[in-house]
Image (cartoon, rainbow, N blue to C red):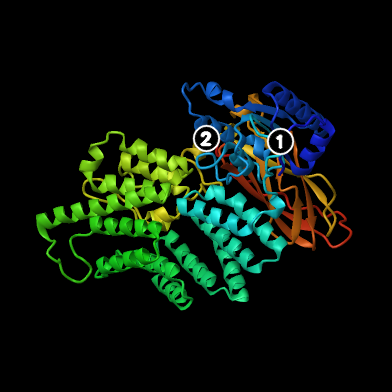
Amino acid sequence: MSFVGHIRDLAAARRELETRRLLVVGGAPDADRSAFLDAVAREVADEAGLPLYRFRVADAGERSGEAGRTPGEAADAVVEACRGVFVVHPCVVVVDGVPAGAADAVPTGTADGSLLAGLISAFAESESFLLVGSTDAREGASALPSDGCADGWALLTRAAVHCDRGDPRAAGPLLRRAVEAHQVAGDRRGEAWAVFLYGRMCRLRGRAEDARRLLHIARERFRAVGERPGEAWACGELARLATRSGAPDPDALAEARRLHERAGDRRGAAWAHLWWTVARADEPGFPWREEFTNVQGRFHEVSDRLGTAWTLHHHALTLARTDGTDGVGGTGGTGGTGGTGERRREADRLFEGALALFEEADCPHGRAWTMLEYALRSPAHRFLNGEWAAEIRHVFHGIGDEAGEAWVDLAEAGPSPDGEPPYELACRYPTALLDTLGWTEAGEPLIPRAARDTQPEPRPGFPRPGDRDRPDGSRAHVRLTLLDDVPVPDVPARIALQVVPGPGHPWSTAPLPPLTARATSLGHAEIDPAHGVPADGAEFRFTPHRPGSHRLRFTVEDPATGTVLQQVEAEIDVVPSDPGPHRPTAPAPGPSARRA
């Protein structure tokens, strides 16, 4: 990344842009700067055959139709627009009117950093060209750090913060850059931590198999470099994977706690103690009151506000759901109507304490779940605010947690007449977890504890309500075509991917939207490029490295919303030498697109 002040050499600017994919121009009058940016952008766009898009920060509020937008809100609008199709599909983007003073900001998004930092973060993994015009930068300003010299440990720290906040979407690009930085530096320890955080991110997104594979790899790498705290964290995250099925593994969590203690990692031991306590909190006779108090003390010792907040959350949840027993075999003086009222007041105090700490720690994920449980367990609190559900839904929406929004919808709607979970929950969570969903006599949901541990995405191909009754002509399908002869080892073969809408589908009479097709090889083969655009004629090169049957996976997504529309797998036979009359296995038909 570079910073260019007063400059008039188009050729030099074009070379700089093609090398860095980023050009920041400032120090000139607005008209001169804008004209120069447009000239550079047109040359690059014409030479590369790419579309050209222009934004002015000052216009963002006007284009949105919202009067009185703050500069930060206008900046957010620009970054969010750039996070969509412009990042996924190669193009040339000009953003002018960026305030100066951004060169020393940390690119964590415009809410806490600068607009320039947010743009750099949004384009970090794209193939697009970004030209930025800074309104009052001075020539000779300090340069932005190069991606090639990125601090891998700083990137890991920022990725971990995003995961702690409950926003794993922003962690992916940071982790990819961190892995590269540690590999370039030859830092095996840093690379092991990057793989671990990748696994943690996958667990948060509900991708259990990917998480399990990465966490196993991280654990082995930690062992290879003698990183005992890392090994303990990996063991703890592997144990937490079991909670997604509704059947936690307390013994594995206890072992992770012992590993942390042997490694001298007090903070890790506190978190493992919390997970172990939560896993057993609903067991009859378990001394949860004593254990939550002990965990809270551990977190206070290491000044971990986030850990304390989650401890208060689960302690309050247990109080609100129990019948008066304290886990020691007696009522503890809390039985009867008076005891019920006292427990409710104590739970309210704990929920309020958790909310305050989540706000201090800037953890919207914990704040949203605490607001939801507080509202459900304290009717008086809920009825004071007629918009309680909308407010909680808004917090979930802010971090892209559609699963959290679905739980709010369930809380508003109440139990379904047929007892089946709503589609938005059924397509995201395992049946075993949803089977543990309960209801109070007042019709309030007892949401499984494990639901707040992940933000699962919809499972590809999960049938939508009414899909079986819909005519086939109203659906869209993925068509794969092998364009070359029968593949042989180490020789590229071309595969074309098309999205074919049926005659009753809306796309049959309108241009196909700019979807993204992502290709993945599930065996000993390479497939390039990793992404294609069906609207432009997506074509992939498949290079197998051994004969036999090879499996490929193609995922069609809407980049504007991040929604997976369809996922199909194909098997292709690769013969050792002369293919003769042999033909590849036809791709298995996949489920229709979710938007169909």
Tell me residue 506's x, y (percent): 59, 27
| Total numbered circles | 2
Residue for badge 2:
470
Residue for badge 1:
139
Tell me residue 354's x, y (percent): 32, 53
Between residue 166 and residue 108, name the one nearer to us: 108
Between residue 425 and residue 28, name the one nearer to us: 28
Tell me residue 335's x, y (percent): 12, 61
Q: Quadrant of residue 192?
A: bottom right
Q: Is residue 596 visible?
A: no
- 511 relative to 572, above or below: above
Q: Amino acid at mark 1?
A: Glu
Write the residue at 39% across / 70% down. 250
Between residue 347 and residue 121, name the one nearer to us: 121
Instruction: Determine the secondary structure under disc 2.
Output: loop
Q: Earlier in the sequence, mark 1 or mark 2?
A: 1
Q: Quadrant of residue 322?
A: bottom left
Q: Amino acid at mark 2?
A: Arg
Q: Is residue 92 visible?
A: yes
Tell me residue 372's x, y (percent): 33, 46
Instruction: Determine the secondary structure under disc 1.
Output: loop
Q: On the picture, is 367 further left or further right than 256?
A: left
